[in-house]
Image (cartoon, grey):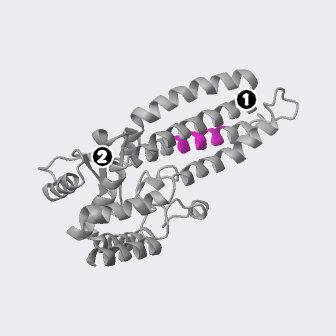
């Protein structure tokens, strides 16, 4: 199912870029965008995880550098029957975490220094179990590709805006490359980027919460962690490198405390209250 979703996302990127190319440059623009999209699909599949880690300035660590964190990831990975992922640290006071990678054999878990200071051992274990669940169910491939897709679409929209400013939208332009093409790209492209992120179903987070609670054996630890992270993210500066294109990958919205109100209207994260309520119910069922 996740392979099918990934294929659909790549097909949507290809179709959107081809339509934009047709709108801006006619048949020649369409061909250029088609070739570009094929290259972008290749890069997204093989390198998007590295691009996301680089954007957040995540640094891979060894057991010697952070033995407690490394050991916790190792213990949970064994419990989840997963290969040991790379462990990365982001130097940011804002607590957050995410997982990335195209499959369990090429995966990484990244946490901020702030999350290690904010959460206790069990709460951090709940967060890491949530992220390992994404890896186990191969959600990370979809997330990293979606981040790349959204970034490309946003870039196209910005290029179109500059084209309009410098006269690219004159009404006498031929072959649909004028004002209507620019207007279509400027309006549709950013909206399409958000829709692609929303296509990464919110149920993915609920499923990862449930599976994470099972992996760590303590859903209430994850519930407590989510409440702390939600509170901190609404009051602290966003992680450096966080954008609307990659925000959906984090366990809580890293832009909640910023002024990106438009992104808030189309949040890719379920409400923390609902997530906590489900985890509490899961804990009650596990005690029966």
Residue 268, position in %: x, y?
A: 52, 59
Screen quadrant of the C terminus: bottom left
Is disc 2 surrounded by few (<14), some (14 to 19) or many (20+) residues within 10 Å? many
Residue closest to the eye, 45 or 228: 45
Residue beneath the point at 60% across and 41% down:
153
Residue beneath the point at 47% across and 73% down:
274
How many discs appear? 2
Residue closest to the eye, 235 or 270: 270
Q: Is residue 232 left or right of residue 255?
A: left
Residue 280 visible in rendering: yes
Query: On the image, which quarter does residue 185 sit in?
Result: top right
Residue 246, position in %: x, y?
A: 47, 50
When the figure is inspected, residue 230 is found, relative to residue 192, above or below; the finding is below
Residue closest to the eye, 135 or 242: 135
Residue closest to the eye, 272 or 240: 272
Secondary structure at numbered mark 2: strand
Magenta stretch: includes residue 157: yes
Dot 2 or dot 1, earlier in sequence: 1
Q: Is residue 192 left or right of residue 22?
A: left
When the figure is inspected, residue 232 is found, relative to residue 70, above or below; the finding is below
Secondary structure at numbered mark 1: helix
Residue 23, position in %: x, y?
A: 75, 33
Q: CA distance from mark 2 to mark 1?
A: 38 Å
Q: Which residues are magenta?
A: 149-159
Residue beneath the point at 27% across and 46% down:
59
Residue 94 visible in rendering: no
Identify residue for label 1.
Answer: 22
Instruction: Label the magenta part by its dominant secondary structure.
Output: helix
Magenta stretch: includes residue 129: no
Identify residue for label 2.
Answer: 108
Residue beneath the point at 41% across and 70% down:
230
């Amino acid at each position: 199912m996740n392979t099918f979703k990934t294929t659909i996302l790549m097909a949507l990127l290809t179709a959107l870029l081809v339509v934009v190319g047709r709108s801006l440059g006619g048949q020649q623009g369409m061909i250029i965008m088609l070739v570009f999209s094929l290259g972008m699909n290749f890069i997204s599949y093989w390198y998007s995880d590295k691009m996301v880690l680089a954007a957040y300035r995540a640094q891979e660590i060894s057991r010697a550098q952070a033995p407690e964190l490394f050991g916790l990831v190792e213990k949970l990975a064994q419990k989840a029957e997963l290969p040991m992922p790379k462990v990365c640290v982001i130097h940011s006071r804002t607590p957050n975490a995410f997982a990335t990678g195209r499959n369990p054999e090429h995966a990484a878990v990244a946490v901020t220094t702030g999350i290690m200071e904010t959460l206790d051992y069990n709460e951090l274990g709940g967060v890491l179990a949530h992220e390992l669940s994404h890896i186990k169910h191969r959600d990370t491939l979809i997330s990293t590709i979606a981040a790349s897709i959204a970034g490309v679409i946003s870039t196209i929209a910005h290029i179109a805006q500059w084209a309009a400013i410098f006269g690219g939208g004159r009404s006498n332009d031929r072959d649909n490359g004028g004002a209507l093409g620019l207007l279509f790209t400027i309006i549709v492209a950013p909206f399409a980027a958000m829709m692609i992120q929303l296509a990464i179903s919110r149920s993915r987070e609920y499923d990862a919460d449930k599976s994470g609670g099972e992996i760590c054996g303590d859903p209430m630890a994850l519930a407590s962690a989510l409440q702390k992270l939600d509170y901190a993210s609404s009051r602290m500066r966003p992680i450096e490198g966080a954008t609307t294109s990659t925000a959906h990958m984090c366990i809580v919205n890293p832009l909640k405390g910023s002024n990106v109100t438009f992104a808030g209207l189309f949040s890719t994260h379920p409400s923390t209250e609902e997530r906590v309520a489900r985890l509490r119910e899961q804990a009650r069922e596990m005690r029966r």
